[in-house]
Amino acid sequence: MIKKDSIFLGLICGMLTPISGIYIYWLLMFRIMAFSAFISHTIQYRLVSPILSISLILNLGTFFLFIYLKRDLSAKGVLFATFVYGAVILLTKLGVF
């Protein structure tokens, strides 16, 4: 069982929230395309970093929700997940991936 205020909970929420953001982006903009085709299109045309950057905005809401609920350790986990995504975006822009 995961504690209500833990870095692990924040890390899980911080990793899953941008993925749901990508799914919402697909629903709003590319619904006519299958999700797997959307992912292939994103990789093929090197749109991973812009789409991932947009989806990270949802982490801001998650972070402030944990701050508001006074769950500081969980907020730290969300912040750490955001830094991990930031490193992935930077490596993608540099052409490592």
Image (cartoon, grey):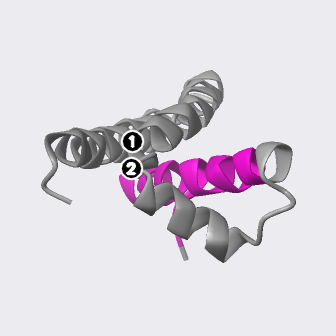
Q: Is residue 78 left or right of residue 60?
A: left
Of the 4 image quadrants, the one containing the C terminus is bottom left
Q: Residue at x 43, y 61 (%)?
A: 44
Decide whether residue 14 is among the magenta residues: yes
Tell me the crowding category of disc 2: few under 14, some 14 to 19, or many 20 or more residues within 10 angstroms, Cα based. some
Q: Is residue 86 visible?
A: yes
Residue occupied by mark 2 = 46
Q: Residue at x 55, y 77 (%)?
A: 1
Q: Main secondary structure of the magenta part?
A: helix
Secondary-structure class at tag 1: helix
Q: Is 13 drawn above or below residue 50 in the view shown? A: below
Kind of residue at badge 2: Arg
Observer-nearest of 75 and 14: 14
Is 29 positioned to the left or the right of 97 in the image?
Answer: right
Point out which mark residue 21 bears.
none
Q: Nearer the viewer, residue 57 or 76?
A: 57
Label 2–label 1 contact, CB within 8 A: yes
Nearer to us in this view, 49 or 81: 49
Residue 11 position, x and y percent, is 42, 54
Q: Percent position (x, y) of residue 71?
A: 53, 36
Report whether 27 appears left or right of 67. right
The front one of 61 and 52 is 52
Magenta residues span 2-26
- Residue 49 disc label: 1
Q: For marks 2 and 1, give the CA distance.
A: 7 Å
Q: What amino acid type is highlighted by mark number 1? A: Ser
Please tell me whether mark 2 or mark 1 is closer to you in this view. Answer: 2
Q: Which residue is found at the position 29% from the left and 38% from the top?
A: 86
Crowd tier of the residue under label 1, counting other residues whose Cα lies within 10 Å: few below 14, some 14–19, many 20 or above:
some
